[in-house]
Amino acid sequence: MNAPLTAQLGVAPSIDWAHQARLAAQIAEAADAQIEAQRQLPNEVAQSLAQLGLYKLLSPAAVGGHQVPPNVYLDVVQTLAERQASAAWCCFIGSTSALLSAYMPAAQAQALLGAPGAIAAGVFAPRGTARRVQQDGVDGLLVDGNWAWGSGSRNAQWISGGCLVLKADGKPETLTDGTPQVWSAVFSADQVQWHDTWQVMGLRGTGSHDFSVSGAFVPLSRCVCLMTDLPQGDAAQHPLYRFGAFGLLALGISAVALGIARRAQDELIAMAAGKTPQGSARPLALHPRTQEEVARAHARWLSAHGWLHQVTQTAWQTAQGLAAQIEPGSMPVALRRDLRLACSHAVTESVAVVDAMQRLAGGTAVYDSHPITRCMRDIHVVSQHMMVGPGTLELTGRLLLDVPTPLHQL
């Protein structure tokens, strides 16, 4: 990478992200049993991943972030997910949650994420309500709410929750078209109460418990509305913050899915050479059905992976050209549409790949401890996320059909 391009992207040339991802995967895989048993990342694992930079992949350089290009972010998360999906999920959630710092005053962003081991987490969904208040001369929001899917929040110092700001009449503040404004309020960990709700079939180690706050005061400097707020300071000119927060969120989900599907393929191929199915004289690898299904699955994975990388790269190149334009929504709608569709497609195809590998594995993969069974459990939980669910197909389909469509969460 030449020096001018490095400076433009804001990437530290000394960081070998492929190496960082492999180290992180080794750390997470070594702690796999502990992660599953505790149903969250042990703090020492989370801190090790933080020291490798995996919670600040998307954070502004001003707070020690790495501002990596989206394809690098995609590759790092996928590599980690191939070995330990829950750790990968927590890292991408931390990275996208830390994006909020790009929209805050510099001093506030530094206070939140300036420490090397700082970790953010949070939920964008508006499951809270807030009222504008002033405490000790400081303007802020008084927030109540309960959020599900608090992935990685037990390891975080700062946890955000989406909320609607209510007016005096009890109705939410809205945009000019009447759409309710969604704010993200960033709480300190001591303001949050966790609820032990994460008893699930997959992604067990993400610690995605419910969390709640009651009457939590949050200064406005720690509140962001991604619908209307602009990046601040140097982040205003950086292409990463023209890319779109919801696109980056969907990218992280699809990266985890692709990593899980790659792991399932690897496990089946390793098994097929040594397993002879009951009633057969030949190893699984010599069965025509196995050969056909493995080839089909590999083609599906490569196609989904390749299209996602292509769309991501095109969007990134466009974002670089738009870096000087700071208007919200400056990324062309067609690119945002295709990115979201490619993310959802990658997840759908990854589910199909994992299911095919599980069927080929037969009775060997019915045991809870088998790696392919883990892949199946994890991928089906990934697929339930609303950012890659059927609603995305409806959204992108409306745009392809040129039907009027709200774009606030594209």
Image (cartoon, rainbow, N blue to C red):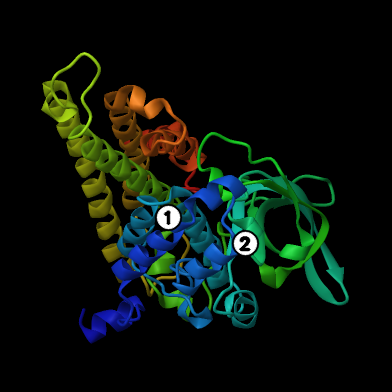
The residue carrying mark 2 is: 155
Q: Out of 217 and 32, give the one closest to the viewer.
A: 32
Is label 2 or label 1 in front?
1
Label 2 crowd bin: few (<14), some (14–19), many (20+), radius 10 Å: many
Q: Out of 218 and 354, give the one closest to the viewer.
A: 354
Residue at the farthest right position: 136
Q: Is residue 210 left or right of residue 18?
A: right
Q: Position of residue 39 (x, y in %)?
A: 60, 47
Residue 11 visible, this angle:
yes
Q: Is residue 82 left or right of residue 136?
A: left
Distance from the alpha carbon under mark 2 to that under mark 1: 18 Å
Element at label 2: helix
* Image quarter hosting the N terminus: bottom left
The residue carrying mark 1 is: 29
Q: Position of residue 38 (x, y in %)?
A: 61, 49
Residue type, mark 1 in image: Glu
Residue at the farthest top position: 279
Residue 177 visible, this angle:
no
Q: Residue at x 69, y 40 (%)?
A: 197
Residue at the farthest bottom position: 3
The quadrant where residue 107 appears: bottom right
Label 1 crowd bin: few (<14), some (14–19), many (20+), radius 10 Å: some
Q: Position of residue 25 (x, y in %)?
A: 39, 59
Q: Position of residue 4 (x, y in %)?
A: 25, 85
**Dot 2 or dot 1, earlier in sequence:** 1
Q: Out of 341 and 360, give the one closest to the viewer.
A: 360
Q: Out of 129 and 323, give the one closest to the viewer.
A: 129
Q: Residue at x 52, y 65 (%)?
A: 99
Residue type, mark 2 in image: Asn
Decide: marks 2, 1 in contact (CB < 8 A)? no
Image height check: is 218 above or below 278? below
